Amino acid sequence: MEDEMNRRKFVRESVLASAGAAFAMSATGSVQKVQAEETATQPNHPSTATTTEMPCGKIANMEVSRLLLGGNLLTHYTHSRDLKYVYSLAKHYNTDEKILETLALAEDNGINTVVVHNIPSTIKLLQKHRQRGGKMQWITCTCHALVASFERFNREIEELVDAGTDALYISGVEADTLCGFRNDIAAANASERTTPANLELLAQAVDLARAHGLPTGLGAHRIGVIVDCEQAGMDVDFYLKTIHHRNYPTANIQHDSSFCPEPERVIEVMQSVRKPWIAYKVMAAGAIPPKDAFQYAFHSGADYVLAGMFDFEISEDARLIREVFPQAQRQRPQPV
């Protein structure tokens, strides 16, 4: 415990001091391969075990299934355009016990990693899942704390490490904001930089997260974030980047229905990026059917797909990944 406190003190004192001034400037601008027969031990969950192996890859020292479970539905945050009742519907459906069943079902289908924000109630459920014998890995980020203050970001990172996370990442909202992309992601001018980038603060946030000795990534909605970070030599282990085509009816209504303003440019830029890429928002919040979305993401060069899934969607989505991933006609080299 004394060693742990000394490490914490070192991280805090060495990084927070230099971050204060940088944040002030920003504010002014503001696998082991997963076998399906290895079922989880949680009681009372429906089993859909299959003998087909889920494809996996490597992110730093983690073996990760090519399909990851998205955390938004588990935290009851659903992108549902102007259908506000859907948030309440998701909350009533995804009870605590249903979330535990969903985690177990995901493991039954070969999904070994969940990506989620720092929502205390959800983190407690992930811990309970482990207490029941679950093996799900966590890739977590703060609840956009870096946009508020570096001190809050540091506090939430420590909370996530103490809770048992396996990897950390800077959220897309945080990275977008610090790189100067502040227009709404669904707006026509979403790709325009509105304030100067504060890459110094972003690099300090990455360094603070990495100081805990865990794989550390960076999320983004605008491809300009990835360009900035690659040019700056940002020391990250992986990226989370949105990717979806725009051939669906609500792509241009500018209301919670578009998360990748420039898919063609994303594909072009990511061709030269050699870090693992987790693609997210691939279904544009349900506007694109899963098979279409998964094929587009992998053809575009993504290494993994992150998908928000209710329990009744997991088995079919896992089957689609096992079918689609080996057939991907990708040009981008696969890191692992």
Image (spheres, rainbow, N blue to C red):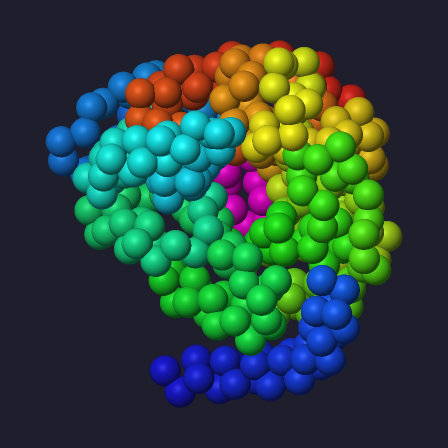
Question: Which sits in the foreground, 14 or 23?
Answer: 23
Q: Main secondary structure of the magenta part?
A: strand
Magenta stretch: give its range: 56-64
Viewer can see residue 202: yes
Please determine whether, in this image, residue 151 is positioned above or below residue 279: below
Please determine whether, in this image, residue 165 is positioned above or below residue 201: above
**Residue 163 placement (x, y as % from top left):** 36, 62
Please determine whether, in this image, residue 235 is positioned above or below residue 256: below
In the image, residue 57 lies in the stretch drawn in magenta: yes
- Which residue is at a point 60% across and 72% down the rendered structure image? 150
Viewer can see residue 325: no
- Which residue is at a point 62% across and 50% down the rendered structure image? 173
**Residue 1 placement (x, y as % from top left):** 36, 82
Instruction: State left or right for residue 55 relative to residue 272.
Output: left
Question: Which sits in the foreground, 152 or 108?
Answer: 152
**Residue 240 placement (x, y as % from top left):** 62, 42
